[in-house]
Each structure stands twice: as structure tokens, then as C-alpha cells.
Image (tube, rainbow, N blue to C red):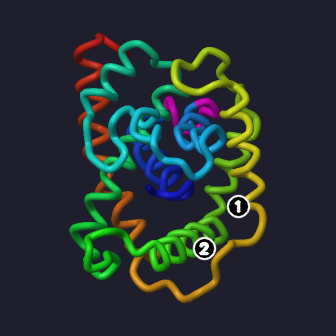
Amino acid sequence: MALTMVHLLAADRWAKGHPEYGQDPGFFYGVISPDAIHIRDGNDKSHKNEIHLNNWGVPHPEDVIAYWQAHHAPFDIGYGVHVLTDAQWVPRYRERLPEILLPSGLLNTDIYYNDTFVTDFRLYAAMPRLEELLSLIEGADTPADHPLLNEYEFSQWRKVTLEAYRGKCPFDRPVRFIDEKYVLDFVEDSVAMIDDTFARFARQSDFT
């Protein structure tokens, strides 16, 4: 999965074309919130695809459209943007970075987690906008009636996320593959699928 700063950068980039979300605390809170499943399940990933609307690693934009048709507050739009970002993240590194895979085809997690965490923390340190977004999220209201996750899980995940990025990166080895350029290129390319999915939702739902 993409880490938090990738999600925030992708959402912020998408919001440039949808300025009604560009300073909305609820939208950006939604952008980090599908990963609140870790508060419930820890490292168990058996429910992650369900919580990610069947988009954890494989795109299923029609499931995001269905979710948005039932739930379309700014928080929910952000939630959908998160899962559409994850849907593109895994296929891209599997296609473009075969060096990060083991001979079995499984992910080399030793390389991957070092690369993604170090790069995420570097982006956060280098881009003041990311702290602005965390501050927006910090002041956002937590939804009490979400269909997949509960109020405690959302608020606790927010707390964990804010504390993590305002602290020290847990990894410190040199980055090998997933560096800042890789992430920024991904962010730019990720917008097309998000835009297309949102446009389809808006047409089907007469959403404005």
C-alpha cells in the first residue's frame, strides 16, 4: 500500500481540479482513514481489501462509485480517493520495479518498507504543505456513522498518524528504488483514474 504522504499528495493534486475539497478538513481526514483498519486488526490484512472497497492493489472503480452513491460527504470522497490511489500503487511497482520483488514474486518487504518510510518522511520534511494537511486533519470532525469503520478506529488512527510523522522515521537505510521522484511521478499519473471515476459518479448520480 502507499503510505500516508503519498495519499495526501495524490489527494492534494486531485483537489487542484476540484477546489471545493482543497482546504476541506473532512476530505483530507477521509484520505488517510481506510488504513484505520490497522487499529482493529493490527498487522492482520485479511479485512483490508473489504475496507478498501475491493481496491487494495487492483482497481475496481465501480465499487468506489457505488460507495460514493450512498456516502458522498467530503470525508467519503477522500476515502474513495485513498482506495483509488492504493489500487494504482501496487500494479505500478510490480510492473516498473521488478527488482523489489523476490524470485517467488512476493514483495521484498525489507527493501520496500525502508524505501517507502524513508521517502515518506523525507517528503513530509521537505514540503510544508504536508504539515498543513496534517493540521487540517487534526481539526476535522470524526464521522460517527461510517458503514465500515467506527469512530474510535478513525480517531485513533489519526492520533497514531500525526504522532508518527511528527516524530522520527523508523527506518534509516539508503533508499534503493522508491524515492521522491518515483512518488511524485506516481502522484501525477494517479490523478487520471481518480478524475475518471469521480466524473462517472457525478454523471450517474447528478452530483454537483
* Residue type marked 1: Tyr
Which residue in the protein does label 1 denote? 165
Question: Magenta includes 23?
Answer: yes
- Residue 79, placed above or below residue 7: above
The quarter of the picture where the N terminus appears is bottom left
What residue did someone put label 2 on? 122
Q: Is residue 73 left or right of residue 69?
A: right
Give the residue displayed 27% in from the left and 46% down from the top.
58
Give the position of the C terminus as an image quadrant. Answer: top left
Highlighted range, magenta: 20-26
* Disc 2 + disc 1, Cβ < 8 Å: no
**Callout 2, which amino acid?**
Arg
Q: Position of residue 68 (x, y in %)?
A: 39, 21
Q: Residues within 10 Å of mark 1 (few under 14, many from 20)?
A: some
Report x, y in % for residue 2. 46, 57
Q: CA distance from mark 2 to mark 1?
A: 10 Å
Q: Residues within 10 Å of mark 2 (few under 14, many from 20)?
A: some
Up the image or down, 116 lies above or below 156; here it is: below
Q: Position of residue 93 (x, y in %)?
A: 31, 67
Instruction: Determine the secondary structure under disc 2.
Output: helix
Which sits in the foreground, 144 or 124?
144
Helix or strand or loop: what does disc 1 sit on? Answer: helix
